[in-house]
């Protein structure tokens, strides 16, 4: 019990050591409206999944409110969400996967709102900026290691209890050929983005270092500005580096680049992945949808003989846009407060959890359903070995970025730690924001609700035009998954292009024929409605036009026409030069549809048949941000207007 108290005390110390540092209140009316008003108050929010149960609850409780949730990627929620606020386009309810202290000036102070007091003090205290509550945590999940229990049993082994035993399990699986994919990997990290990787790596240090006497001293030193990350995090990569050295984990999958990831759920379901770090929701999905295999969950395992532990991670954090306090927004502000007040009830939490799969609420009086806690984590949860890592969002992002660079041999561990220490103590605007002025936009060009993955958009046209212009090819084809942001009227800075097209895939020029171009376009429309998120393979184009029929439950999308801008047909006897990314051309391989399935363009990946009738003409050093910068430079002094439209026609799509 003394040990448990000491670890709990450390959690508070850690929250203080990494305290966030920045920024109105509103109506407290809670009465439910009895009649449907003539005009509803629209409240906007961005999230990475739909929340139909919560939207229905809001509508049933408050008939005068219309909550509209815009779906977008996790990359967009933080990066694009922040940029929208800075440009005055932010949603009413602001969502962040990780609280960002540098946007405090755009958010409302919720400290005096009655619903803010309903959350656990240990969580809300760590979210304060200059003593004010800016964020509320959504329900979250426990994280740990998910493993294929059926395969472990087939090997005659039991679940590992130490990191060394985990490596031994991987050795045995590799030797037996169980839980191994065609690419040789058997271990992965779910959502290998910077934040998730950073949370995982921080988690491996609690309590083996951070919960011990040396760790507590380190925490105190960090608070006083005397500590160094290298003193605490030097061993955080041990397990991953061992897995990489033995070929069990491919570091390419840890870059965060488009397509360079393991589709964890499908690989686990088919038995070609033995182990992953992930959330309880993934475990639930695997056990719910698969009858052939059974899966288990393990906590973080100690090298030092300490009790195992787990992390509790909110799925996201909510705040309110400070612009709601401006005159004329009184009704919308009141509606937002009512929504957050409803969210802060057991009924509201359960409605969110019904869609997200989360089950760990941070309301003071709402305990998790014990029957939903995985068996492998129950002892940790019941014993209090659950940790919330309160690290400033900016630092967490940067730490994850540097650790991914180490895993890919881009920098040494010492160099990475020095960089993180310098960033933590001094900050660096050049790292956070490239403030170089690139040019000017005449109007907004927006990426909203995955529109660049479903049809023609001004922003998609701009990116494709820039790619074609820098290479001089006949046509350019840019997959919608490469475009992750918007550009807004007014000046454009370097960091905005980095967030618009965040992936460092190089542009290449290929020579090919009309038949291959048609096959490529058909592939681009082949998975528009297969999943709840439109697939990123949809093609934005320059120098060419096409039309297609929107898919239905009974019929697949069909390519209807491909023409030049003047309406003439492509010649069957000629070849054309096209600009695409090396990702589409097979540089990232086509395993599990990396490369978005563009095997008809393959000029790189030997494990997939090389494309016939396709010739590699030029490998450029340009990425999409380079192309965009060159496009703006060529029009210096002129505000960028939308390019010519009419490139993509969608037939039969219901826009409602």
Image (cartoon, grey):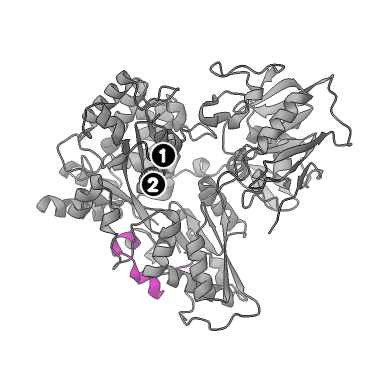
Q: Tell me the element at label 1.
A: loop
Front one among 597 and 244: 597
Above or below residue 41? Residue 648 is: above
The answer to whether residue 369 is visible is: yes
Magenta-tinted stretch:
107-124
Residue 123 falls within the magenta-colored stretch: yes
Q: Which residue is at 45% across, 69% downward?
A: 340
Report the residue marked by disc 1. 190
Front one among 117 and 127: 117
Count of all numbered marks drawn on residues in the image: 2
Q: Tell me the element at label 2.
A: helix
Q: In which quarter of the image is residue 273?
A: top left
The disc, 1 or 2, on the residue closer to the chain's N-terminal end is 1
Front one among 229 and 458: 458
Quadrant where the C terminus is found in the figure: bottom right
* Label 1, residues with CA under 10 Å away: few <14, some 14-19, many ≥20: many
Residue 585 falls within the magenta-colored stretch: no
* Label 2, residues with CA under 10 Å away: few <14, some 14-19, many ≥20: few
Q: Which mark is residue 288?
A: 2
């Amino acid at each position: 019990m003394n040990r448990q108290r000491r670890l709990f005390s450390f959690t508070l110390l850690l929250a203080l050591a990494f305290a966030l540092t920045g920024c109105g209140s509103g109506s407290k009316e809670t009465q439910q409206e009895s009649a449907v008003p003539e005009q509803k108050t629209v409240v906007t929010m961005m999230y990475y999944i739909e929340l139909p149960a919560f939207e229905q609850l809001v509508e049933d409780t408050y008939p005068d409110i219309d909550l509209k949730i815009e779906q977008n990627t996790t990359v967009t929620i933080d990066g694009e969400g922040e940029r929208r606020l800075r440009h005055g386009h932010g949603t009413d309810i602001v969502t962040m996967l990780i609280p960002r202290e540098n946007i405090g000036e755009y958010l409302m102070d919720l400290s005096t709102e009655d619903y803010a007091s309903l959350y656990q003090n240990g969580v809300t205290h760590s979210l304060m900026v200059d003593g004010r509550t800016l964020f509320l945590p959504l329900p979250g999940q426990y994280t740990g290691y998910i493993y294929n229990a059926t395969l472990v049993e087939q090997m005659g082994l039991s679940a590992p209890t130490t990191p060394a035993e985990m490596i031994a399990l991987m050795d045995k699986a590799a030797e037996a050929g169980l839980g191994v994919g065609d690419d040789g990997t058997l271990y992965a990290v779910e959502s290998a983005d910077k934040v998730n990787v950073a949370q995982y790596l921080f988690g491996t240090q609690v309590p083996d270092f951070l919960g011990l006497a040396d760790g507590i001293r380190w925490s105190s030193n960090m608070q006083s500005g005397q500590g160094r990350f290298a003193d605490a995090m030097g061993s955080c990569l041990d397990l991953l580096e061992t897995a990489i050295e033995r070929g069990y984990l491919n570091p390419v999958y840890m870059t965060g680049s488009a397509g360079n990831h393991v589709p964890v759920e499908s690989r686990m379901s088919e038995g070609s992945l033995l182990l992953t770090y992930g959330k309880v929701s993934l475990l639930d999905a695997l056990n719910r949808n698969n009858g052939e295999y059974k899966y288990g969950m393990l906590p973080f395992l100690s090298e030092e003989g300490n009790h195992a532990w787990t992390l509790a991670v909110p799925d996201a954090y909510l705040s309110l846009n400070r612009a709601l306090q401006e005159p004329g927004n009184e009704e919308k502000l009141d509606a937002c407060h009512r929504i957050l007040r409803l969210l802060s009830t057991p009924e509201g939490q359960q409605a969110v959890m019904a869609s997200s799969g989360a089950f760990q609420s941070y309301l003071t009086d709402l305990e998790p359903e014990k029957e939903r806690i995985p068996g492998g984590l129950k002892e940790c949860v019941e014993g209090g070995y659950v940790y919330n890592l309160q690290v400033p969002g900016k630092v967490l992002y940067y730490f994850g970025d540097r650790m991914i660079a180490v895993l890919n041999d881009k920098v040494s561990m010492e160099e990475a730690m020095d960089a993180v220490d310098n960033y933590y103590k001094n900050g660096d605007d050049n790292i956070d924001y490239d403030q170089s002025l690139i040019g000017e936009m005449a109007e907004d060009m927006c990426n909203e609700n995955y529109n660049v993955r479903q049809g023609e958009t001004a922003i998609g046209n701009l990116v494709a035009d820039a790619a074609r212009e820098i290479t001089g090819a006949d046509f350019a084809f840019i997959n919608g998954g490469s475009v992750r942001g918007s550009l807004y009227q007014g000046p454009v800075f370097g960091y905005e292009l980095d967030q618009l097209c965040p992936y460092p895939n190089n542009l290449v020029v290929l020579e090919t024929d009309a038949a291959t171009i048609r096959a490529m376009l058909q592939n681009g429309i082949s998975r528009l409605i297969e999943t709840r998120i439109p697939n990123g393979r949809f093609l934005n184009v320059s120098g060419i036009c096409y039309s297609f029929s929107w898919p239905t439950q009974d019929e697949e999308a069909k390519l209807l026409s491909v023409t030049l801008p003047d309406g003439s047909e492509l010649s069957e006897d000629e070849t054309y030069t096209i600009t695409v990314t090396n990702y589409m051309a097979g540089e990232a391989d086509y395993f599990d549809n990396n490369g978005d399935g563009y095997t008809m363009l393959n000029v790189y990946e030997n494990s997939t048949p090389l494309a016939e009738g396709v010739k590699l003409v030029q490998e450029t050093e340009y990425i999409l941000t380079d192309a965009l910068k060159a496009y703006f430079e060529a029009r210096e002094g002129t505000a960028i207007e939308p390019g010519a439209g009419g490139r993509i026609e969608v037939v039969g799509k219901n826009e409602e």
